[in-house]
């Protein structure tokens, strides 16, 4: 981390008022980071709490609590079980002893002495709370009087038994003192089962408070936690070192075998004695560094958005650990005792420094020691260590290896985000919530059954779930993330069951069936590997040892195989094919082998593989797309080999989704009954001066050209190729008029359009020609946009997406799923394929706050997340496909969008704005024919649907049935046209032998009743010039643009939805209303009177209402037999 | 259906009963608004034509013929021009070279002889591409002008409309295949769409012929333009200037060459500029000043942006 020269630091020193902060921010260069600073300041202001009002009554309550505890009953030493039962009986509560409970026979004694030392600690005193955190608590530590404890209490939970008894006694006292004004319950401090605490929630008081002060911010729901702790320096630190084994109970005979170390237990004990010490540390840091508090709040938000909290089940790294780490780094982080960070840094700088620190240190891999280490750290492996040498305490003791790994990953992601100056750094860092399993993990497994798991000899206070979890992690890490085999998983995470508060009158119920969730992030390149090649079987001892180790780990699955190059290796072969099945197979095998979990189907529940199955996405799909690509190359060669073409072919480019791995349906490459489905391509020739200087003439020349290509192709590939020249449904002579369909016998078909560079020049000239009439110029610029889309943007876009698909294996299925989602929600007729592809690509190119998705699963959910969060009214979507977009270009794009919004605030012409390096205008894929595509209504619907989908994803979590996201709701539409499926299918086939004149009359006698006599038999149907459903929709849109907005998914969609335009409901009567209207009786009552002067009426301009019935009836007539039924709401 | 006013503004309201279809089994009324045709530029036929607005989208001449014959009997209806057809008429086949069009407009002969014009029309017709639809659809709410036999018929139609309101016997909108006419409008729906696909792939020879006809026409027009250009090249206008036109003595420079030359020139200019930046001290000073100003400006902009975001709120609240 570069903190800049010393001069700059000085500037930062004198900060305090926001104004000064802004000023100093201005003097620091780097524009993006400057915005980041301002945004962070704003965030701090937003989440800041007014402690006086938010914690109204807290001080008073604290005093009352202190007073009551000071007045508590005392007694002399009694035997512990007797004391406990006496207390329980007297006050009807339970003593929250940790498991294992003290044996009845144990003979040590407890006494009660009034505590003298009270302290309020935690974020309440440091004022580092954020209003957005899920729960607010005021922590009050009560130091247990030293005379009640003994030095040897550190052994065998004895301290914790005494602590529990002490807590129960306090609870009894407070229950009596506070009565009904507060609600008391036990909860676990940070989910640590050895440390129960008492939570006190004021009941009635807060209500009165909020009633009194309505105008001020409503008081938050807070709790006061009473935390008993041990006096400082009670236990000798050396005894509590990480590697010590402090639990020896129950095995008196086995003293000679060295007991296993208990690092968690030891650290819990040190933590118990360090409350006050750390309070001092933080106080000092606060004094030394002005920005300390703010950095803590920023850190809290950052952690919170990533699901990290102090609680063991939430990673064990929370606000406190963050603050301690920062304080230690400020006071002497490195081994020589020098401060690693300067206290003069600003909050954002400190935040970035800490992120940098967390990104380069992985607590799980290598113990991290802060301060001068006095002795060797004998920490057991697999235990993350962040050691505070001065206080001999492992700050990260609550963390697990996986949470340390995850924290490290998250920090790395944030670091790369903060190093990317081009993108919005603020929102992904602090605002977006990035802890949803479905967004994070490709596959989530729930272990429903802990297996025939033997209790290990070391009773870890964290319980069985913890044991199983850490074993599962260790095994899976070896099985899935083995570096030498090629790591299949990038990240393995284990989610432990959380703890919850329980009433003081009950015992802590350990969850009957704790379930562990294992989340796995795939490495897309390796996860689909079916053969694991292990170590080489060789003669040397080393090799033999390796092989032995490999065989031992994989058990019976391991076998020797000979590979090419005569290498003999230990191998594991898997049967499955898809990444999900492979992962499941491996997990089931290996967990069963070691933990006896997974043999039964219901032991493991696998989440995440339902989504690809929805579309039956297969790994082999890529091969089909590649085959299409190959067929295209053949076609290109055939065209290039034509000898008699007057111009040389410069390029033949593909422009359709099928040729860029992104169509929902696979391209059709074999002859089918339903006729050929041409893949679209464009051809461009060498520059020539022979094109006529008129757009219309160019279009005709193109037809002649196509006719020529067609006949030449048929001649050169006789019997192999059939060509059809088709006319476009063009509105004017200056549009492209024709295309050539080339159908191969093998089934592949291509549609060819010709690019002429002169056309572009002419259109450009025409659109800029001031002497022309306005409408001519508008038309010319529309045509120009269409031209550029077809011949410039689409080929480039195809190229880009094809490259990206190879770069990101998960992109192709993500695009297809996203398109499918748009299809089912009847949105795709409003969105261009290119837009959807770019939207999916966006989550790969700027994936923050995550990494680029590695499967379609995460890709799809994050794409939805992006669509739901994209504020397209204000922000452009900028895709830096080349990776080299400059800041100036981005600014220019944003400025352009702002300009559009100023010109067209109603967003009638420009709605979505998607810019790529080759299209800085931002409209190439979101405008068609001079109209916005999508229109505002459709774009708003997209956002609304994506938002509700995200809500479902969030609410259902991993158990989500993805089919729920793909249920269309027809109820939203005012009119639904149900197409006749049979007729719609029939519409797909027309034959060259059909006589158009005869078809007009539609006589069924036309076809012979004997199939073999029908002249159409054996003939393959014509290609579709445009899909009949598309043609119908185009006409409906053209006719009813003013009255109805139509919604339809894929062309095969069985129904079309439509919504009435509310603005078209009533109009003043005039010529050329945009839809069919009927006279309204009520409003135009005067007009019913014939005799009344016509002049009056004209001035009044009678109102007319939308003639909905007539419009629907018209649609029924247009659709004819194609429409089976029309459901119209309210008609 | 509630009572409907017989007139609205200067229009008579003509309700039409729409036949019931199985896909939407409801009897509904469509309202056609009729008045005498009074265009801004009067024509000879105005007195015997009627102006309709809100014609049904599936209107064809045949259907309107049937409608008017039910109102006033057979033989009164002559023809109809729909809104989109009128527009099309204003944009004839664009078959001229771009420069020729301008030249013709400025210097073309005043008026061609009639038979020449007819011939040209015929040629243009031959050059038109075949349509791909058996029948067009109108825009909803669009207009049409109906030409009737004589002025009297127009009166009768309006009277008949008034009568319809009294008798409540609304004329029916026939699908087109009503018996008695012998002819039927091409059906819509499936057949219409299938016919469209079939017609999108016209006969190759017919298409070739159409393209050939177009090129002949185009060549002819180009030649005309060349002649005019030649003529005006040699003729000074009233101020004594000679218009510069294409095709002078020197062949026009190739476009590619011109572009190449321009590119080179820009390159050279840029190179020259580059050599001279940061050469003098004042340049450096000015650049620094500019940078500072830019920074200050951006800072202001950022601040503004933040305040906009603050107004929207929500942007600064971490999601839960």
Image (cartoon, rainbow, N blue to C red):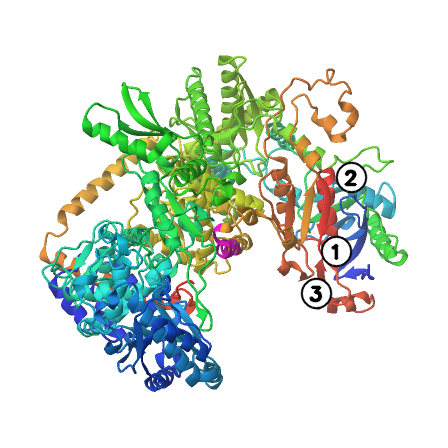
Name the mark nearer the viewer: 2 or 1.
1
**Chain for disc number 1:** A
Label 3, label 2: how far apart the Cα atoms are: 32 Å
Pointers 3 and 2 within a single chain = no
The magenta region covers: A947-958
Residue A653 in the image: state x and y as whole percent: 42, 30
Q: Are marks 2 and 1 on the same chain?
A: no
Foreground: A427 or A233? A233
Task: Calculate the distance from the C-alpha at mark 1 to the C-alpha at mark 3.
Answer: 27 Å
- Residues A761 and A128: in front is A128
Seen in the picture, residue B222 relative to A8 is either above or below; the reply is above
How would you rate the neighbour count of disc 2 (Cα within 10 Å): few for under 14, some for 14-19, many for 20 or more?
some
Is label 2 in contact with label 1 (beta carbons under 8 Å)? no
**Which numbered disc covers residue B62?**
2
Q: Please report contact status of discs 3 and 2: CB closer than 8 Å, yes or no.
A: no
- Find disc 3 in the rendering and name its residue: A1101
Residue A534 visible within the image: yes
- Give the percent coordinates (x, y) of residue A439: 42, 50
Residue A155 painted magenta? no
Whole-percent x, y for residue B313 in the image:
42, 68
The residue singled out by tag 1 in the image is A1131
Q: Is residue A399 above or below residue A287?
A: above
Mark 2 vs mark 1, CA separation in Å: 30 Å
Q: In the structure shown, which secondary structural element does the residue marked by tag 3 occupy?
A: loop
């Amino acid at each position: 981390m570069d903190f800049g020269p010393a001069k700059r630091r000085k500037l930062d020193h004198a900060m305090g008022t926001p104004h000064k902060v802004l000023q100093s921010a201005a003097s620091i260069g780097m524009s993006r980071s400057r915005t980041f600073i301002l945004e962070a300041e704003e965030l701090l202001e937003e989440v800041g709490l007014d402690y006086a009002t938010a914690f109204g009554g807290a001080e008073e309550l604290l005093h009352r609590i202190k007073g009551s505890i000071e007045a508590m009953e005392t007694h002399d030493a009694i035997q512990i079980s007797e004391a406990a039962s006496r207390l329980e009986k007297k006050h009807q509560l339970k003593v929250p002893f940790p498991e294992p409970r003290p044996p009845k026979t144990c003979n040590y004694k407890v006494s009660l002495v009034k505590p003298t030392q009270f302290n309020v600690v935690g974020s309440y005193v440091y004022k580092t709370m954020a209003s957005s955190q899920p729960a607010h608590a005021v922590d009050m530590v009560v130091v247990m009087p030293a005379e009640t404890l003994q030095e040897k209490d550190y052994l065998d939970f004895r301290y914790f038994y005494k602590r529990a008894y002490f807590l129960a006694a306090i609870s009894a006292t407070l229950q009596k003192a506070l009565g009904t004004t507060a609600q008391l319950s036990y909860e676990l401090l940070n989910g640590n089962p050895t440390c129960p605490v008492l939570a006190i929630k004021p009941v009635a008081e807060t209500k009165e408070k909020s009633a009194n002060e309505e105008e001020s911010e409503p008081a938050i729901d807070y709790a006061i936690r009473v935390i008993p702790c041990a006096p400082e320096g009670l236990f000798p630190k050396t005894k509590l070192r990480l590697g010590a084994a402090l639990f020896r109970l129950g095995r008196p005979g086995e003293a000679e075998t060295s007991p296993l170390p208990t690092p968690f237990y030891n650290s819990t004990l040190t933590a118990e004695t360090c409350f006050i010490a750390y309070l001092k540390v933080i106080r000092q840091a606060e004094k030394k560094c002005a920005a300390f508090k703010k950095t803590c709040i920023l850190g809290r938000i950052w952690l919170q958005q990533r699901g990290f909290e102090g609680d063991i089940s939430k990673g064990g790294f929370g606000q406190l650990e963050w603050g301690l780490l920062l304080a230690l780094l400020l006071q002497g982080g490195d081994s020589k005792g020098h401060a690693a960070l300067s206290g003069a840094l600003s909050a954002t700088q400190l935040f970035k420094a800490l992120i940098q620190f967390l990104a380069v240190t992985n607590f799980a891999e290598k113990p991290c020691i802060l301060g001068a280490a006095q002795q060797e750290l004998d920490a057991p492996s697999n235990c993350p260590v962040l050691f505070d040498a001065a206080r001999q305490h492992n700050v990260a003791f609550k963390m697990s290896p996986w949470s340390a790994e995850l924290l490290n990953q998250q920090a790395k992601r944030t670091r790369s985000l903060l190093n990317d100056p081009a993108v919005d750094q603020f929102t992904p860092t602090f605002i977006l919530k990035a802890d949803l399993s479905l967004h994070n993990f490709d596959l989530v497994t729930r272990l429903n059954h802990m297996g025939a798991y033997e209790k290990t000899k070391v009773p870890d206070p964290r319980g069985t779930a913890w044991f199983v979890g850490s074993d599962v992690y260790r095994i899976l890490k070896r099985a899935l993330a083995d570096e030498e085999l090629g790591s299949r998983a990038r990240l393995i995470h284990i989610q432990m069951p959380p703890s919850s508060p329980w009433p003081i009158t009950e015992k802590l119920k350990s969850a009957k069936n704790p379930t562990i969730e294992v989340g796995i992030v795939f490495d897309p390149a390796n996860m689909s590997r079916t053969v694991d090649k292990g170590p080489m079987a060789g003669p040397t001892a080393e090799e033999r040892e390796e092989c032995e180790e490999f065989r031992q780990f994989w058990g019976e699955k391991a076998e020797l195989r000979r590979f090419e190059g005569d290498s003999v290796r230990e191998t594991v072969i898997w049967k499955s094919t898809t990444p999900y099945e492979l992962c499941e197979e491996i997990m089931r095998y290996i967990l069963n082998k070691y933990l006896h979990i997974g043999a039964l189907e219901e032991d493991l529940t696998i989440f995440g593989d339902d989504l690809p199955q929805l579309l039956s996405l297969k790994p082999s799909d890529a091969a089909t797309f590649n085959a299409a690509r190959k067929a295209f190359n053949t076609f290109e060669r055939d065209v290039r080999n034509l000898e008699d073409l007057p111009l040389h072919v410069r390029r033949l480019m593909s422009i359709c989704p099928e040729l860029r791995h992104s169509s929902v349906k696979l391209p059709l490459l074999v002859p089918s009954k339903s006729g050929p489905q041409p893949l679209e391509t464009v051809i461009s020739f060498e520059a020539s001066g022979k094109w006529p200087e008129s757009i219309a003439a160019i279009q005709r020349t193109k037809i002649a050209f196509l006719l020529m290509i067609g006949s030449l192709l048929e001649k050169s590939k006789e019997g192999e190729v059939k060509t059809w020249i088709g006319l476009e449904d063009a509105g004017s002579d200056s549009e492209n008029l024709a295309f050539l369909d080339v159908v191969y016998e093998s089934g592949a078909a291509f549609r060819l359009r010709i690019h002429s560079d002169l056309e572009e020049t002419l259109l450009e000239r025409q659109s800029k020609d001031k002497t022309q009439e306005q409408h001519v110029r508008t038309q010319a610029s529309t045509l120009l946009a269409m031209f550029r889309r077809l011949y410039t943007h689409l080929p480039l876009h195809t190229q880009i997406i094809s490259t990206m698909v190879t770069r990101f294996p998960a992109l192709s299925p993500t695009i297809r799923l996203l398109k499918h989602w748009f299809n089912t929600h009847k949105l795709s007729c409003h969105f261009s394929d290119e837009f959807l592809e770019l939207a999916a690509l966006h989550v790969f190119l700027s994936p923050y706050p995550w990494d680029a998705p590695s499967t379609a699963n995460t890709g799809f959910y994050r794409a939805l997340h992006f669509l739901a969060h994209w504020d397209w009214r204000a922000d452009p979507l900028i895709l830096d496909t080349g990776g080299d977009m400059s800041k100036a270009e981005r600014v220019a794009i944003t400025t352009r969008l702002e300009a559009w919004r100023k010109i067209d605030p109603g967003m009638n012409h420009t709605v979505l704005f998607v810019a790529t390096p080759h299209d800085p205008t931002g409209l190439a894929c979101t405008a068609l024919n001079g109209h916005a595509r999508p229109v505002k209504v459709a774009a708003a619907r997209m956002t609304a649907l994506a938002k509700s989908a995200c809500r479902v994803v969030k609410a259902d979590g991993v158990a989500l049935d993805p089919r729920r996201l793909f249920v269309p709701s027809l109820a939203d539409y005012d009119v639904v046209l149900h197409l006749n499926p049979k007729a719609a299918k029939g519409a797909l086939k027309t034959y060259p032998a059909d006589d158009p004149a005869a078809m007009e009359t539609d006589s069924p006698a036309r076809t012979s009743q004997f199939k073999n006599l029908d002249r159409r038999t054996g003939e393959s149907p014509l290609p579709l010039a445009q899909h009949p459903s598309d043609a119908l929709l185009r006409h409906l849109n053209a006719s009813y643009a003013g009255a109805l907005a139509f919604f339809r998914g894929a062309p095969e969609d069985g129904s079309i939805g439509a919504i009435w335009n509310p603005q078209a409901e009533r109009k003043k009567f005039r010529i050329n209303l945009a839809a069919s209207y009927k006279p309204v009786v009520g409003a135009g009552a005067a007009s019913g009177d014939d005799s009344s002067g016509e002049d009056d009426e004209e001035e009044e301009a009678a109102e007319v209402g939308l003639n909905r019935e007539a419009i629907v009836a018209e649609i029924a007539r247009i659709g004819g037999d194609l429409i089976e039924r029309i459901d119209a709401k309210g008609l | 259906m509630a009572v409907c006013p017989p007139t609205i503004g200067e229009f008579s309201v003509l309700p039409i009963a729409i036949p019931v279809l199985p896909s939407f089994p409801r009897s509904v009324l469509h309202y056609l608004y009729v008045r005498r045709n009074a265009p801004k530029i009067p024509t000879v036929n105005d007195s015997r034509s009627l102006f309709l607005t809100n014609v049904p989208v599936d209107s064809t001449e045949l259907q309107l013929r049937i409608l008017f014959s039910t109102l006033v009997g057979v033989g009164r209806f002559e023809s109809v021009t729909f809104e989109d057809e009128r527009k099309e008429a204003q944009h004839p086949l664009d078959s001229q070279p771009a420069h020729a069009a301008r030249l013709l407009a400025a210097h073309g002969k005043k008026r061609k002889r009639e038979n020449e014009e007819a011939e040209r029309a015929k040629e243009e017709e031959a050059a038109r591409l075949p349509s791909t639809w058996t029948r067009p659809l109108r825009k909803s709410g669009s207009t049409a002008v109906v030409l009737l036999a004589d002025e009297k018929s127009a009166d009768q139609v309006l009277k008949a409309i008034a009568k319809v309101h009294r008798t409540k016997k609304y004329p029916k909108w026939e699908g087109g295949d009503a018996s008695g006419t012998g002819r039927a409008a091409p059906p819509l729906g499936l057949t219409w769409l299938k016919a469209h696909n079939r017609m999108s792939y016209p006969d190759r020879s017919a298409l070739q012929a159409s393209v050939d006809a177009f090129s002949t026409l185009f060549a002819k027009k180009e030649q005309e333009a060349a002649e005019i250009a030649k003529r005006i090249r040699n003729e000074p206008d009233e101020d004594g200037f000679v218009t510069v036109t294409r095709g002078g003595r020197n062949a026009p420079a190739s476009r590619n060459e011109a572009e190449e030359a321009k590119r080179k020139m820009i390159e050279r200019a840029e190179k020259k500029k580059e050599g001279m930046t940061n050469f003098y001290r004042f340049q450096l000073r000015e650049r620094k000043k500019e940078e500072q100003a830019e920074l200050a400006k951006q800072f202001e902009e950022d601040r503004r942006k933040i305040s906009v975001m603050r107004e929207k709120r929500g942007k600064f609240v971490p999601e839960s």
